[in-house]
Structures are given as C-alpha cells and as structure tokens.
Image: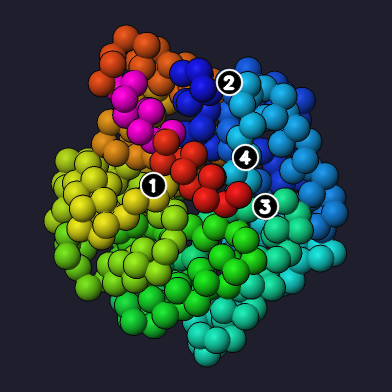
Amino acid sequence: MSLKERIGQVLMVGVPATGSSAADRSTIAAHELGNFFLKGRSSAGTGATAGAVQRVESTIAKALSVDVDAFVATDQEGGYVQVLKGSGFSTLPTALVQGSWATATLRERAEVWGGQLAAAGVNVNLAPVADTVPSASFAPSNAPIGYWKREYGYDPATVSAATRAFSSGMLAAGVDPVIKHFPGLGRVTKNTDTARNVTDTKTTRRDGYLKPFRDGIAAGNDWVMVSNAYYSRIDAKNIAPFSSTIMRSMLREDLGFNGIIVSDDMCDAVQLSPWTLGARALRFFEAGGTMMLCVDAPKMPAIANALYAEAGKDPAFARLIDAAALHVLRVKEDRR
C-alpha cells in the first residue's frame, strides 16, 4: 500500500444515508479513503440502502491498488438514534427499553437487527452505548445520553449485560459493534456536538463505570469509540481523542484492547472548534488513535492532506500511521 492508501485506511468519511453525491465520491477517490459512515436519516429501506452502499464501495475499489474491503458504518442504536428505516428495517426501541429486556431477548433481537444491516451492506454499527447514567433523576440533565434515553440503565452491571448482549447479537449477524463513548458520557451535562469545554469531573482511571467497556472488550469486541469530552480526573489538559493516557494507557494497557480505537465525529463537533482540522488529525493519531471519523466529506481533504504532509516529513509519525493502518487491516482480514 502507498502512504496515501494507508492514510485512507485510518479515516472514515460521512456520506448521506440516502445516497452519496458525485462530490462525495470524488473526495473518496481522490484521497483513496477506505471507510465510510452513512449519516443523517433514511427511510428508503434495505434495497435502496444497499444500492447507495454499493456505489461508494465501487468508488473505493476503483481507487485502491489493492483488494481491501471497506468498513461501512452507521448509527443504528434505536429510539432517537436510528439512521436506517423503511422496508426491511425494524423500528428499534430506545436503549433504555432494550436494557429492560432479558439479555437473551436483546441478543436475539440484535442479531435480527444486525442481519438487516448486513443485508443493506453495512458491516459496522456505531453501537452499543456503554455509558452509564447515574440515575433516572439525573438523566434529563445528561444532554448527550440520558436526555435521549440512550442508556441501557442506571448502574454499570445492567449496562454491561446489555452491552454484551447487543454486541453478541450484532457479531452473530456479521456486523461489528462499536462500544461507545469511552471512558463514558453519562455524567456530563453538556453535549460535545453542540458545546465547548464539555468536562466530566468524576470519572477516574479505574472507575467502576468503566465496567461495561471492560466487559465488552473482554467479550471480544474489536471497536471502541472515544468520546470528545475532557476528563479532569484522568487528563485535565487534553480532550479524550488527544489523550494518550485515555487511549494508550487506559484502553491499550489497562483494558488490554487490541482493536480499533475510533474517534467520535471530529469535524462538526463544537467541542473541537478551537483546533484546525489538520491539528485535530495529527493530535488524534499522535495520542494513539486508530481511525478518525469525519462526518463532513468536504472537510476530509484538509485532514488527509495534513496527515500526508506530516508522515512525509516525520518518520516517527509515519510509523504511527502504519501501525494504525495495520490495526485496521487486521480487523478487516479477520472478517473475511
């Protein structure tokens, strides 16, 4: 693989779930991007979604010099966060409802939902949410999770059991689940998508609320998404995607995670607004990230170009990109 292709493997670009534009596909081809995320909302059903996916996959296949499958992701949590609907897709209840079911029931239904994603060409689901909200009374104040009923419950044991059940069902259907948002967004009040300086002041490096993430990793999940928040009791100076303490020390060392550390959206999130697109990309990979998600395709060239320029002049940074690309390629190979 060329350097450009290796960089393309560690990036995931957003395209509308209803269908990519010619400009989207041009960006993907020009920068040899290897992964994409279906964003927004679609009621087109599995058949039309599969067609939309195939158009982008064809673009990727033509652009690359090697035969490497694309990771095709979406957000199919349930409730208010369900990108794909229409014929062939079930209507998923909120995670709070899912968490009230027996784990065997949740696993069985998640396998059905995963099969629907697979039929549409999706092989990665940015779910389950492993964040624990402390209580039902606090939930409405927890803007990113509890307000939307995205939590499975109000204690780590409940959330862990549901996280593992949902993940197991998805894996059985051939879809990779993504545990998010490490190390947890259940204790904040502001949302990193819409606010700056979102800070968790309670979570510690060995917090009990890490149990759902720890158990999910131990169960064999290959993906963990890092939140965009600050964690003042872990690394007060750096947001999570810029923190080697959170990604290398906690995820890699403490939890023994060997898979893909994917970012939350780093292009449109207000939390990231103080940094240029290029700086965001460099700091994420310098801190130990594996794959950077950017939901806004027109912003991706600035990211890819910054990575290419830095890797071209700094051998140490080039080695970081190589290591991240190898992580991605290993997970892709395991899927074959």
- In the image, residue 86 above or below residue 316: below
Residue type beneath disc 2: His
Instruction: Residue under label 3, please give it.
Output: 122
Residue at the limit of the structure toward the top, as seen here: 313
Nearer the observer, disc 2 or disc 4? 4
CA distance separating discs 1 and 2? 21 Å
Left/right placement of residue 135 relative to residue 78 reads left
Nearest the eye: 69 or 254: 69
Residue type beneath disc 3: Val
Left/right placement of residue 102 relative to residue 28 reads left
- The x and y percentages for residue 256 are 27, 57
> Of the numbered discs in the image, which one, if any, rests on residue 261?
1
Nearest the eye: 200 or 225: 225
- In the image, residue 14 above or below residue 129: above
For residue 263: magenta? no
CA distance separating discs 3 and 2? 22 Å
> Is the residue under label 2 in contact with that under label 1 (CB below 8 Å)?
no
Q: Which comes before the other along the chain, label 4 or label 1?
A: 4
User: Could you classify mark 1 by the number of other residues whose Cα lies within 10 Å: few (under 14), some (14-19), or many (20 or more)?
Assistant: many
> Of the numbered discs in the image, which one, if any, rests on residue 31?
2
Q: Which comes before the other along the chain, label 1 or label 2?
A: 2
Can residue 274 be seen here? The reply is no
Residue type beneath disc 4: Ala
Q: Which comes before the other along the chain, label 4 or label 3?
A: 4
Residue type beneath disc 1: Ile
Q: Which comes before the other along the chain, label 2 or label 4?
A: 2
> Of the numbered discs in the image, which one, if any, rests on residue 70?
4
Magenta-tinted stretch: 317-325
Q: Which comes before the other along the chain, label 1 or label 3?
A: 3
